[in-house]
C-alpha cells in the first residue's frame, strides 16, 4: 500500500464546514486526512483525528512543529464567545483569539524543510459588511476594496499574506454564503435548531409556522460543496493566493423554501408566527428530552449539544426583529467558475438532503412518524 502523497489537516473538524471537508478529503484517492478539534471526535472512515486546543500555542507547536507530512491545511475553525454569537463578531478579544488560533497552526508548519504547500481559510458574507450595513451593492464581488470595518477576517488574511510572501506555499480564501450541513452543536448551522423547533410544534399539534422576519432574497451553500471547492483549490494553479465567493448557484427566500422544509419533516405549513428561536428554544430542554425518549432518537439529550448557538444564528439569517422590505444579499460566484470550479446545487434539494440525513441518522423523527402521530 503506497503512502498518500498529500496530507490535509482539517482544522475545526467538528464544525459544519470542517466536518464536511474531513469526510470529503478522506474519500479522495491519494489523500490522507487528519481532523483537528478541541474535543474528542470519531473520524469518518479513512480519516484520522488529532485532539488539540488551538488557543494553546505550546500544545500546537508540540503537535505540529515536527510534522513533515502535512502538505495542506483547510482552516475551518472559528472562536465564538459563549452566548455572544452575532453580537461578538466585532469584539476585539474575539478577533484577536481567532487570529492567534490560525497563527498557532500555520507557524509550526511554515518552516524550512517543511512540507506545507497550501492553506485554505474561510471568510464569508461579513467580508462585505452584511452584518453591519443595511444594504450592500448587488452582486458583491471579490475585487472590491476591503470593506472598512474591523473583522478577524482581515487579521487572518494579513497574517497569511505576510507569511506567504516569504514562503513557497500558497493560500486560498473562500467566502461562502449561508452554510448548511449536518454538524451537531455548531454555532453557525441552523438545520438542527429548525428541526427541534419543528418537532416542538409537532408535539403540540401545531403546524410548521415560519418564525422569521420579512422576506429577503439570499443565497446558501451546501457544506459538501464547500468541501469540494476546498479540494479543488488545494491543487488548482488558478486558486493560488485568490479569494472566491462561493454559493449553491441559485438564490432563495426563506418563506419560499419553507414548504419544502415542512414537507421533508412531514408537517403542514402554518401561517407565519414571528418569534425568536434563540430566546424560546434554550428553555425547551425537558420537551426535547420527551421527544428523544418518545421516538427513541440517537440525538444528544442535551439540547445545547444538538443545536449549539444555531437558534440565534437562525434568528439572524431569518431576519428576526427586522422590518421590511429588505434589500437582497447576493454575492457573485463568477470568479470561481471562471477559475475552474463549476459545481452547483439546487437549494431546495439541499434542504431536503440535510433534514433527510438527520432523519436517517435518527437525530430527528422521520416524516412518516410525523404524519402517523
Image (tube, rainbow, N blue to C red):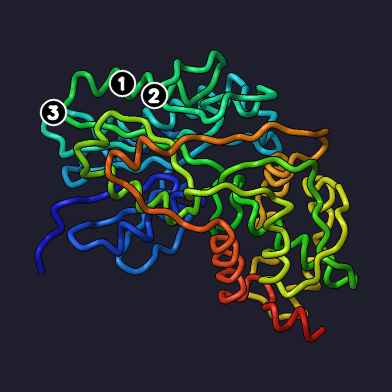
Q: Are marks 2 and 1 in contact (CB under 8 Å)?
A: yes
Image mark for residue 157:
2
Which badge, 3 or 2, is on the more N-terminal residue? 3
Mark with earlier residue (1, 3): 3
Q: Which residue does the numbered mark 1 point to in the structure image?
A: 161
Looking at the picture, does residue 13 appear above or below residue 294?
above
Quarter occupied by the N terminus: bottom left
Q: CA distance from mark 3 to mark 2?
A: 22 Å
Q: Nearer the viewer, residue 232 or 334?
A: 334
Mark 1 crowdedness (10 Å alpha carbons): few <14, some 14-19, many ≥20: some
Neighbour class for label 3 at 10 Å: few (<14), some, many (≥20)? Answer: few
Residue 316 sits above or below residue 241 on the image: below
Q: CA distance from mark 1 to mark 3?
A: 18 Å
Q: Which residue is mark 3?
A: 112
> Which of label 3 and label 2 is nearer to you?
2
Task: Give me the residue at 32% from left, 34% from top.
Answer: 172
Visible residue check, residue 65: no
Rendered location of residue 149, percent (x, y): 57, 16
Q: Is residue 29 above or below residue 96?
A: below
Residue 191 in view of the camera: yes
**Residue 255 in the image: x percent, y percent?**
74, 52
* Secondary structure of residue under mark 3: loop
Residue at (54% x, 24% y) in the render: 95
* Residue 246, percent from left and from top: 44, 41
Task: Where is residue 41? Give x, y as percent.
Answer: 46, 59
Amino acid at each position: 500500500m503506497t503512502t498518500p502523497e498529500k496530507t490535509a489537516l482539517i482544522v475545526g473538524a467538528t464544525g459544519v464546514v470542517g466536518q464536511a471537508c474531513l469526510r470529503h478529503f478522506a474519500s479522495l484517492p491519494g489523500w490522507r486526512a487528519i481532523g483537528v478539534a478541541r474535543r474528542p471526535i470519531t473520524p469518518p472512515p479513512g480519516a484520522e483525528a488529532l485532539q488539540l486546543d488551538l488557543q494553546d500555542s505550546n500544545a500546537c507547536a508540540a503537535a505540529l512543529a515536527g510534522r513533515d507530512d502535512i502538505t495542506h491545511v483547510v482552516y475551518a475553525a472559528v472562536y465564538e464567545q459563549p452566548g455572544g454569537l452575532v453580537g461578538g463578531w466585532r469584539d476585539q478579544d474575539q478577533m484577536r483569539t481567532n487570529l492567534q488560533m490560525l497563527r498557532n497552526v500555520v507557524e509550526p508548519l511554515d518552516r524550512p524543510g517543511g512540507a506545507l504547500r497550501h492553506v485554505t481559510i474561510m471568510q464569508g458574507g461579513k467580508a462585505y459588511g452584511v452584518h453591519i450595513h443595511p444594504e450592500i451593492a448587488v452582486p458583491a464581488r471579490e475585487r472590491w476594496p476591503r470593506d472598512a470595518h474591523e473583522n478577524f477576517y482581515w487579521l487572518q488574511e494579513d497574517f497569511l499574506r505576510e507569511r506567504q510572501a516569504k514562503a513557497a506555499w500558497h493560500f486560498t480564501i473562500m467566502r461562502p454564503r449561508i452554510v448548511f450541513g449536518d454538524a451537531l452543536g455548531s454555532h453557525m448551522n441552523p438545520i438542527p435548531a429548525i428541526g427541534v423547533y419543528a418537532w416542538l410544534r409537532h408535539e403540540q399539534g401545531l403546524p410548521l409556522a415560519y418564525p422569521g422576519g420579512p422576506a429577503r432574497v439570499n443565497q446558501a451553500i451546501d457544506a459538501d460543496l464547500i468541501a469540494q471547492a476546498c479540494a479543488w483549490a488545494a491543487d488548482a494553479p488558478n486558486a493560488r493566493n485568490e479569494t472566491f465567493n462561493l454559493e449553491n448557484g441559485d438564490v432563495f427566500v426563506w418563506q419560499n423554501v419553507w414548504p419544502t422544509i415542512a414537507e421533508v419533516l412531514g408537517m403542514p405549513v402554518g401561517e407565519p408566527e414571528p418569534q425568536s428561536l434563540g430566546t424560546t428554544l434554550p428553555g425547551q430542554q425537558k420537551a426535547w428530552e420527551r421527544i428523544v425518549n418518545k421516538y427513541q432518537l440517537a440525538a444528544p439529550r442535551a439540547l445545547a449539544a444538538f443545536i449549539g448557538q444555531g437558534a440565534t444564528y437562525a434568528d439572524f439569517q431569518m431576519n428576526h426583529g427586522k422590518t421590511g422590505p429588505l434589500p437582497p444579499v447576493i454575492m457573485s460566484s463568477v470568479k470561481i467558475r471562471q477559475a475552474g470550479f463549476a459545481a452547483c446545487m439546487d437549494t431546495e434539494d439541499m434542504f431536503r438532503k440535510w433534514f433527510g440525513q438527520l432523519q436517517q441518522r435518527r437525530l430527528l423523527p422521520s416524516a412518516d412518524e410525523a404524519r402517523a402521530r
